[in-house]
Structure formats: C-alpha cells, structure tokens
C-alpha cells in the first residue's frame, strides 16, 4: 500500500503543470556565484557611498513615488507590465502568459537564492538604522542580489521575445521596477545592478531551452491575438 501511494505521488508530481514544478534554468547552469562580484562590506567606503545614495533618494522621495514603490513591492507577477500593454493585459485574458510568468518567478527564486545565501549581505536598513524604508523589511541577510529586480528583468526580457516592438517601453519599466527597490529603501544600488546581470545571464541560457521556446510561442500567440498586435516576424 505504501509503495503504491509513493508511486502515485511521483506520478502526480510528473503530471503537474510545469509552471508549478520548476523554472527553466538552474544555478548550476547560470553560475551566479562566479559571475557576481563580492558585494561591498558593511561600513566600507563603497557601502557608505551606497547608503548616502539611499539617503538622497529617501530625502527626495514623494508620496506618489513611495506609493508606486509599495505597489511594485507587492507585485512579482508578469502583470507588472500592464503599464506597457494596457488594461487587457491580465491573468484572466492571458493564462499562457501567466503560466510563463510563474516559471520565470521560479527561475528567479532558484538563481538568486543561491547567491543570496552565499553572499549573506545585510539589508541597508539593518546597516544604517537612520534609513526609513517604506516597503516590507526582514531580518534575514539576503540583500544581494535583489530578487524583485531579477524577476522584473527576466519577465521583461521574455516579453521582449514576445513583443520586440515594445522593447524600449519594456526595458524602461524593468529599470523603473528595479529602481523602486531603492525608493523602497530595502536594497543597495549594487544589489539592483547584480540582479540585472543575473537576469540577463539566466535569460541567455533560457533561450536555448526548447521548453522555454515552446512556452514563449504559446504566450506570444495568446498575447498578440488578445491585444490585436500584428503577427510577429
């Protein structure tokens, strides 16, 4: 009986939707610990300069900027790009796009998680208690690289594969999404820069994966039809 139950459990896992199981790229493929420089140590000149930049951002932060940063803090789905694609860009209209986004989120977790655990960087507000973050904080030392920024760029690069004519708008939104981690006051600038590097490295590997190309084609057909975009070349 136990053996039968175990077999059924394995079969259920194998038959589960791919988006629920895993992403496309593992850290053994992307090597985040090899491509990322060691982040500045606390109280080093580089770290202090980054903290000074965060203070400058905080001092200039408006209520509107804080609200946008908080909204981005709560949204790590591919639909953060609704500002580019409009009101029809929703999970209800685009299940294949939503499934692709879920797999990309899994890629972010796997590939930044390895680096976060290895570098063990203290969050800026835990280094400098005079900072006033406006987004969720945590005690865990996992600032480097930024997970939000990584997933933002991963999803943006995938959307460029789907709608290359919107490339500039997509990249501008990815940049803004990453910058909002600084507006939040929860990451150092070098956390954001490292995240962008990881995202581009993971995406380059991802594009060689037949499973990614299959999911991209499904998402491309769905999105372009739903939004009335001309057929991609």
Image (cartoon, rainbow, N blue to C red):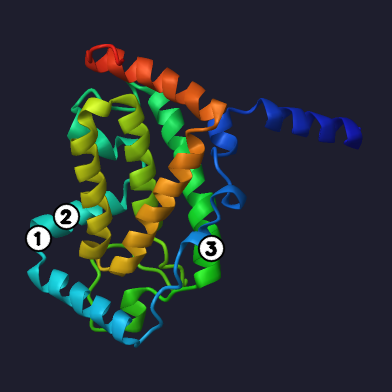
Q: Determine which quarter of the picture holds residue 14.
A: top right
Residue 94, percent across and down?
Answer: 35, 22
Quote the CA–CA distance across marks 1 and 2. Answer: 6 Å
Quote the CA–CA distance across marks 1 and 3. Answer: 37 Å
Q: Residue at x 50, y 29 (%)?
A: 212
User: Which secondary structure lies at badge 2?
Assistant: helix
Nearest-to-viewer mark from 1 and 3: 3
For label 3, the residue is 33
Q: Are marks 1 and 2 in contact (CB under 8 Å)?
A: yes
User: Which secondary structure lies at badge 1?
Assistant: helix
| Above or below 213: residue 31 | below
For label 1, the residue is 63
User: Which secondary structure lies at badge 3?
Assistant: helix
Disc 3 crowd, CA 10 A, few/some/many (<14, 14-19, 20+): some
Q: Nearer the viewer, residue 131 or 167?
A: 167
Residue 11, percent across and down?
Answer: 75, 28
Disc 2 crowd, CA 10 A, few/some/many (<14, 14-19, 20+): some
For label 2, the residue is 67
């Amino acid at each position: 009986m136990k053996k039968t139950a175990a077999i059924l459990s394995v079969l259920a896992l194998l038959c589960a939707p791919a988006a629920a199981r895993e992403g496309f790229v593992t850290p053994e493929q992307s090597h985040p610990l090899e491509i990322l420089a060691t982040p500045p140590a606390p109280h080093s000149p580089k770290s202090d300069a980054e903290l000074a930049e965060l203070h400058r951002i905080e001092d200039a932060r408006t209520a509107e900027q804080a609200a946008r940063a908080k909204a981005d803090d709560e949204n790590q789905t591919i639909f953060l790009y609704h500002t580019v694609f409009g009101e029809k860009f929703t999970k209800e209209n685009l299940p294949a796009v939503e499934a692709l986004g879920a797999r990309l989120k899994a890629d972010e977790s796997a590939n930044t998680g390895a680096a976060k655990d290895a570098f063990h960087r203290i969050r800026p507000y835990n280094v400098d208690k005079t900072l006033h973050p406006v987004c969720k904080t945590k005690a865990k030392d996992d600032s480097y690289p930024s997970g939000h920024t990584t997933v933002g760029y991963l999803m943006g690069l995938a959307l460029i594969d789907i709608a290359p004519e919107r490339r500039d708008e997509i990249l501008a939104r990815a940049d803004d999404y990453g910058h909002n981690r600084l507006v939040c006051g929860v990451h150092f600038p070098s956390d954001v820069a490292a995240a962008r590097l990881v995202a581009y490295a993971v995406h380059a590997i991802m594009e060689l994966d037949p499973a990614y190309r299959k999911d991209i084609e499904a998402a491309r057909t769905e999105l372009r039809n739903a939004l009335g975009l001309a057929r991609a070349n």
